[in-house]
Image: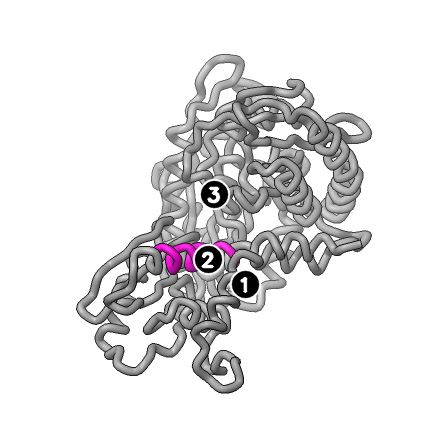
Amino acid sequence: MISAILILAGIVLGAVGMEVWLRVRRHRTDAHGQPPADGPPLLEWLLRANAAQGAWLIGPGTRESAAPRAGLSESVDRNIQARLEKQRDGDGQGVERFDAGILVYASLDGRAAGLFLLPDCSTGEKATAVRDLARFLDYARWKPVLTDIAREQGSPGESIESVAVRLAYQLERLLGVEICIALLRPTGVEIAGVSHRSDRRLLKSLVEPGSALEMAALGKAGALDGVVAPFGNVVSDRRKRLDPAFVCAIPGLAGPIGAVAVWSHNGAEPTGPALADFRTAISNAALRLQGALERTALQDSANRDPLTGLRNRRGFSEVMTSITNPTGALLYLDLDRFKVLNDSLGHPAGDDALLHLSRVLLKAVRDQDTAARIGGEEFALWLPEATLERGRQVAERIRQALAWSDWKWQGERWPLTASFGVAACPESSATREGLAPQADAALYEAKRSGRDRVVVATT
């Protein structure tokens, strides 16, 4: 049987590899037909395939180039890299004319790649170069996912994400449309897998309460046709797409374990022979997903807060003691006047308020960050490699999001606010061990000085 990972890799890399390789053969100049050893191979291949004067890749912590050909001055090289740096934050493509040639570029997920073409290149050559760059960046975006799938494929302990992404790819190959997989997790209904055509930034995002994916995953709704924005207002989905999707549950042994969104024509359920294959693929994957969810739940049981699904004090302590690079920011936060809320509305309302705060936290953090509930109404955030100022900014964003959120209990609005203490290594503390006392002291000062504010630790 052909390995599934080969099929997945072929989807992503095939368009880049085969076409570019064929065109590389037409432009090779060395005797042995090998790219030089001083540059990234794919970047070098793109340069040769497009007969370009230079090729660059600019990204977070990355600045690579295929050696510019003779005649391209250092000032032009620096100017091009500066232009690409400005393009990193956008997702787009473009063409710019220089005296010495034409720069074509594409940007995606914080990376920008460019090719510097000859001044007399044709419109078709420019379009081909832009397409190659877009495919190159798309491959770079998916390479980590494919690597994880390749490592875990077929193993008895494969991860939730591996199974979910494989299912998304399988359904996209079957139906030829974009797919999103959401699963029930301790913190809510989480997007665990997306297909190649989808936006990878959606991964690990929580769908909005009341959204179609949540309703289907919780068994509160059956199959739904023509659903616009099935995950609700997820910040990671920057396209804000309005085309409708079909949503249905992923069945488990004791009820749904998740849901699938399919951007089919007019958001209708697949029909004909594809419908049987669609249902079979979901049914087969459901068994593996249930097993992966159960294994993860068992592993996390001692380290997770049962109410919010965040790490508990023990789980957070394990994260903090296991880090090898202590550089980063530690945030402590405390829900203001929580005892008054509990006494006035009751403990079920208090639990719901804590859940609400946990969702606000998860929306504000990155995949590599760690959020935890370390006490009754006390929470913590670890932001690896973040500066003290970055920690303050994140805390302020969470503070505002909570204060502006519309939390209600039994139809009545109750204002929620929180106080924050921020410390960072090495700025406020030279060691990891000194972060917690500093963040705690800063939190105490925030509470003492009026609550609903952020206080930064001082050295």
Q: Which residue is mark 1?
A: 17
Q: Nearer the viewer, mark 2 or mark 3?
A: 2
Residue lying at 51% horizontally and 61% vertically, measured from the top left:
19
For residue 333, the mark is 3
Rendered location of residue 385, percent (x, y): 46, 61
Do the numbered discs 1 and 3 sit on residues whose CB atoms are within 8 Å?
no
Q: Earlier in the sequence, mark 1 or mark 2?
A: 1
Residue lying at 55% horizontally and 44% vertically, measured from the top left:
203
Residue lying at 27% horizontally and 73% vertically, measured from the top left:
77
Q: Nearer the viewer, mark 1 or mark 2?
A: 1
Q: Earlier in the sequence, mark 2 or mark 3?
A: 2
Question: Which region shows up in magenta?
Answer: 127-139
Q: CA distance from mark 1 to mark 2?
A: 13 Å
Q: Earlier in the sequence, mark 1 or mark 3?
A: 1
**In the current view of this chain or complex, which residue is farthest to the left?**
99
Is 313 on the left-hand or right-hand side of 235?
A: right
Q: Nearer the viewer, mark 1 or mark 3?
A: 1
Q: CA distance from mark 1 to mark 3?
A: 49 Å
Height in image: 318 above or below 179? Answer: below
Task: Mark yes or no: residue 430 visible.
Answer: no
Is 77 on the left-hand or right-hand side of 141?
A: left
How many residues crowd around disc 2 within 10 Å: few (fewer than 14), some, or many (20 or more)? many
For residue 137, the mark is 2
Height in image: 191 above or below 28? Answer: above
Position of the C terminus, as image quadrant, is bottom left
Q: CA distance from mark 2 to mark 3?
A: 38 Å
Rendered location of residue 262, percent (x, y): 59, 31
Amino acid of disc 3:
Leu
Amino acid of disc 2:
Leu
